[in-house]
Amino acid sequence: MKKMLLLALFFGASNLFAQQQQDSILIKEIPTIKNNVFQQRQEIDALTKKLNNQNFTIGKQSQSVSTLQDENINLNSSIDSLIQLIQTNSQNIVTNSSELGIKIQETRQKANSQIAHLDSSVEKNQLYWIIATLSTLLLGGLVYWLLGKRITSSKIDVETQIRNTKTVLVEEGVKLDNKLLEVLETQLKLKQEETKAKPSISYEKADHSLALKVADEIVRMQKNLTQMDEKTKGLKQLKSSVQRIQDNFAANGYELVEMLGKEYNEGMKVTANFTPSEDLETGKQIISRIIKPQVNFKGEMIQAAQIEVSVGE
C-alpha cells in the first residue's frame, strides 16, 4: 500500500514537473508567436491593398471596355452610312456615264460636221495663207539682215571711236610726260648749279628728295614706254627725253639699280610683295615689277627698292 502511494506521488510529481517545463517553454515562445502573427497580419494588409488596387484597375478597364464597345457601335453605324453613300454614288456614276457617253457621241458628230465644213473653207483659202506666210518670212528676213548690217556698222564705228579716243589719250599722256621731263630736267640743272655754288654741304646733309622723285618718274615712264605702240605720236621724243634725263641723273652722281627681270634672293635689301605665277618653274622667283627703284648716290643706297616678285608654283 505504501509502495503504491509512493508510486502515485512520484508519478504526480513527475507530471507536475513536466507540465511546469512545458509552461515555461510556451511562455518563451509567446513573443515569437506574436511576432509571427504581426508579420502575417501585415502581409494580409498588403495583400488586401493589392486586391483593392486590382479591383480598382479592373473597374477602370471595365469602363474602358464599355467606352470601346460604344465607339465600336458608332463606327459600325458610320460604316453602314458610308456603304449606303458609296452605293448611291456608284449608281449616280453609272447614270452620269451613260449620259456623258450620249453627249460625247453628239459632240463628236457635231465636231465632224464642223471639221468637214472647215476643211472645205481651208482648201479655198490655203493658197492665200501660204502666200501671206512666205511674204511675212521674206520681209522678216530682209528686216533682220538690214538690222544686223546696221548693228555691225554701229559696232565698228564704236570700236573705231574707242580706239581713236585711246590713241588721243595716249598721245596727250606722252605730251604731258614730255613737259614733266622738261620741268624735272630744269629742276635738276638748278639743283646742280646750287650744289656747285655751295660745295661745302656735306653728303649726309644733301637733299635727295628731287632726285628720288625723278627716279620714280623715270621708272613709271619706262614702264609706260614698253606698253605703247611704236606708231604713237611723240613717242620717239619721249624716249629721247627719258634717256637724256637718265644721263643727267647719272652725271649728278645718282644711279638707278636695274632689277626688273632678275632673279630675287633673300639677301636683297628691298621691300618685296610676292605673287604666285603659273608661267615660272616651281620655286623660281623673278622680279616682275618695280614699284619704287633702288637709288644710289655716289655708290651709297639712299632709297631701298619696293618690288613685286613672281613665284613659280
Image (cartoon, rainbow, N blue to C red):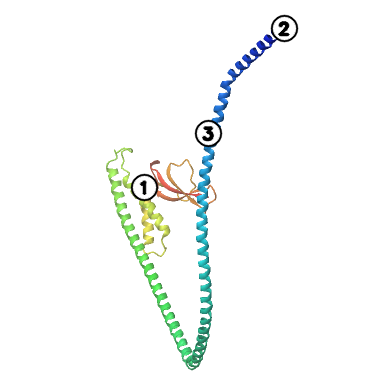
Please name whichever residue, 293 or 178, is drawn nearer the observer in this view of the structure: 293
Label 2 sits on what residue type? Met
Q: Which mark is residue 224?
A: none
Asked if residue 157 can be seen in this view, the reply is yes
Residue identified by numbered label 3: 45
Q: CA distance from mark 3 to mark 2?
A: 63 Å
Classify mark 3: residues with Cα within 10 Å, few (<14), some (14-19) or many (20+).
few
* Residue 192 sits above or below residue 95 on the image: above
Choose top left, top right, bottom left or bottom right for residue 24.
top right
Q: Position of residue 161 (x, y in %)?
A: 37, 70
Please name whichever residue, 24 or 252, is drawn nearer the observer in this view of the structure: 24
Label 1 sits on what residue type? Ala
Secondary structure found at label 2: loop
Asked if residue 312 can be seen in this view, the reply is no
Tag in front: 1 or 3: 3
Tag in front: 2 or 1: 2
State which tag comes first along the sequence, 3 or 2. 2
Residue identified by numbered label 1: 251
Classify mark 1: residues with Cα within 10 Å, few (<14), some (14-19) or many (20+).
few
Q: Is residue 48 left or right of residue 148?
A: right
State which tag comes first along the sequence, 2 or 1. 2
Residue at 50% of width from left, 50% of height from top? Answer: 63
Residue at 50% of width from left, 88% of height from top? Answer: 110
Label 3 sits on what residue type? Asp
Residue identified by numbered label 2: 1
Secondary structure found at label 3: helix
Q: Position of residue 46 (x, y in %)?
A: 53, 34
Q: CA distance from mark 2 to mark 1?
A: 178 Å
* Residue 122 sits above or below residue 61 on the image: below
